[in-house]
Image (tube, rainbow, N blue to C red):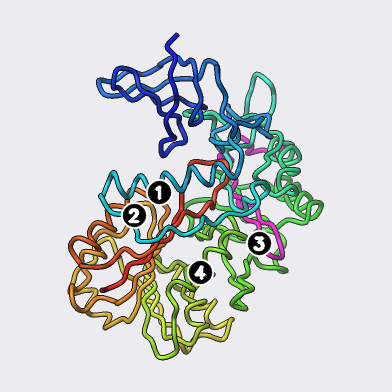
Amino acid sequence: MPIGIVESLDHEARGITRLEGKAIFVDGALPGETVEYASFRRKSSYELAHLVSVLKPSTARVEPLCPHFGVCGGCAMQHMEPSAQVAAKQRVLEDSLWHIARVRPETILPPIHGAPWGYRHRARLGVRKVAKKGEMWIGFHEKRSSYITDMRSCAVLPPHVSDLLLPLREVIGSLSIAERVPQIDIAVGEHCTALLLRVLEPLKARDEQLLREFADRHVLLIYLQPKGPDSAYRFHPASGPQLSYTLPGFDLEMEFRPTEFTQVNHAVNRLLVRRAIGLLDPRPGERIADMFCGLGNFTLPIARSGAQVVGIEGSQALVERGRECAVANGLAERVEFGVANLFECTEESLAALGQFDKMLIDPPREGASELVKALGKASGPRRIVYVSCNPATLARDAAILVNEKGYRFVVAGAVNMFPHTAHVESVAVFERP
C-alpha cells in the first residue's frame, strides 16, 4: 500500500497527498497526517483513494459523534475538530481566490461560525422501502450512492427532529402508498416544524388519518406535494403557526413556505446578515440593489437602515413572498421587488434599473458572472458586498471585478454555514478606488 503525507484539503474535504507529482485525493485524511491509502480511480493527472490507515494522526483528528459517519453522505468532516474545520474552510477560500483568479483581498476577515451540532433547520431526506428488512429507511443518501442511509439519529439536525426519524419510519411504512413517498423535506421555523411529503399517488382516508394523528402527537405541520413545488399545500393542521425565522438584530420576522429557499443555519445566518449589512453600511437616502434577493433575507435588513432597496430575483414566488414580508414588517415603502433572470443580465437590462450607490450580490453556486460583466466601468455601484456559496465562482467573479471593472478587493472571509460538510460560504467586499 502506498504511503503519503497529506498537504491540505480540497473543496470536497479530501486530503491531498502526492505521488511522483500526481495529486492523490484521499477520503478521510487530514492535513499533516501520514496515511496509508488505496486508490480506486486512476487518471493521468490525479487519483481518488480510500484511507486505509492513519500512521501519524493530526492533532485535529477527533472521534466522529455520529455512528453513521463514513456511510452517510450528509457530513464529510466529523473526524476533524470543529475549529480546525473553520480554519480549513478559510484556507479553501483563500486558495481558490489565488489559484483560480490570482486575486487576494487586502484584509482577511475572521471566519463566521456557530454551534457545530443541531444546526440544520432545513433538510431533504430520501425515503426507501427495504424489502429484505421489512423497513422504511429515511435519511440522507449514502456517500457517492443513490442508496438511503439507515439513519436512526442525526447529530446535525435539531434534537427534536432527530428524535422523529424512527417514528417517521413507522408512520410512512404504515401508509398504503408507502412506496410512493420518495422524499420528505424538513423545515424548522421559529414557532413550528414542518414536514413536506412528496406523494406520487393520492392518500387514502386511512392514510390521511394516520398523518393527522402523527402531526398532532408530535406537534408538527404537514404539507403534501403531489407534483412540482407549486403543487405543495398545507395538509394539517389547517390553521395555526406559520413557518418563519427571525433576524432579531433588525427586528424582522420572515415567513416562508417549506418549498422556498431559506438558509439552513438560522444562528449563522443572523451573524452573516449582521456582517454583510455592516460591510455594506447602508445609509438613509442611498439607493441600494440586492441581487438574487430571494424572499428578502438581506433586502429587509438593508431597508431597516433607512435606505431605498431594489430586490431582484428570478423566482416570481419568492418575490411575492418578499413583498408580503416587507408589508408585514412595515417596510413596504422602502422596498421594491422585481423579477429578472440575472444569469442573462446585460448592460442595457441593468442600466434600466437605474443608478445604485451600493449593491449586495448573493447568487447560487453558479455565481454572478453575467451580472458583474454588465456593471458599467464608471457607473457601477461604489461598493459591492458579495455573499458566495462557492469559492470557485466567487474567485472567477472577483477577477472580473478587479481586472476588468477596476474595483479594489477590500476584504473577504469564510462563513461556516454547514459544519461537518465541505460546503464553504463566504462574504467579500469590492470598492471603487
Report the side of 53 relative to 215 (left or right): left
Report the side of 48 relative to 141 (left or right): left
Amino acid identity at mark 3: Gly
Amino acid identity at mark 2: Leu
What residue would you read off at disc 2? 394
Of the numbered discs 1 and 3, the one sitting upstream in the chain is 1
- x then y, percent, for residue 278: 49, 73
Mark linked to residue 297:
4
Q: Kindly identify the residue that appears in the image at 24 percent across and 66 percent down.
A: 345
Of the numbered discs 1 and 4, the one sitting upstream in the chain is 1
Crowd class of label 1 (few under 14; some 14 to 19; many from 20; radius 10 Å) = many
**Nearest the eye: 262 or 358:** 358
Report the side of 47 relative to 415 (left or right): left
Amino acid identity at mark 4: Asn
In the rendered image of this protein, does residue 46 appear above or below residue 323?
above
Magenta range is: 174-196
Q: CA distance from mark 3 to mark 2?
A: 30 Å
In the rendered image of this protein, does residue 354 appear above or below residue 415?
below
Q: Quadrant of residue 284?
A: bottom left
Q: Secondary structure at mark 2?
A: helix
Q: Secondary structure at mark 1?
A: helix
Q: CA distance from mark 4 to mark 2?
A: 20 Å
What residue would you read off at disc 3? 189
Q: How many marks?
A: 4
Determine whether label 1 and label 2 are within 8 Å by CB. Answer: yes
**Nearest the eye: 112 or 368:** 112
Q: CA distance from mark 4 to mark 3?
A: 15 Å
Q: Secondary structure at mark 4?
A: loop
Amino acid identity at mark 1: Leu
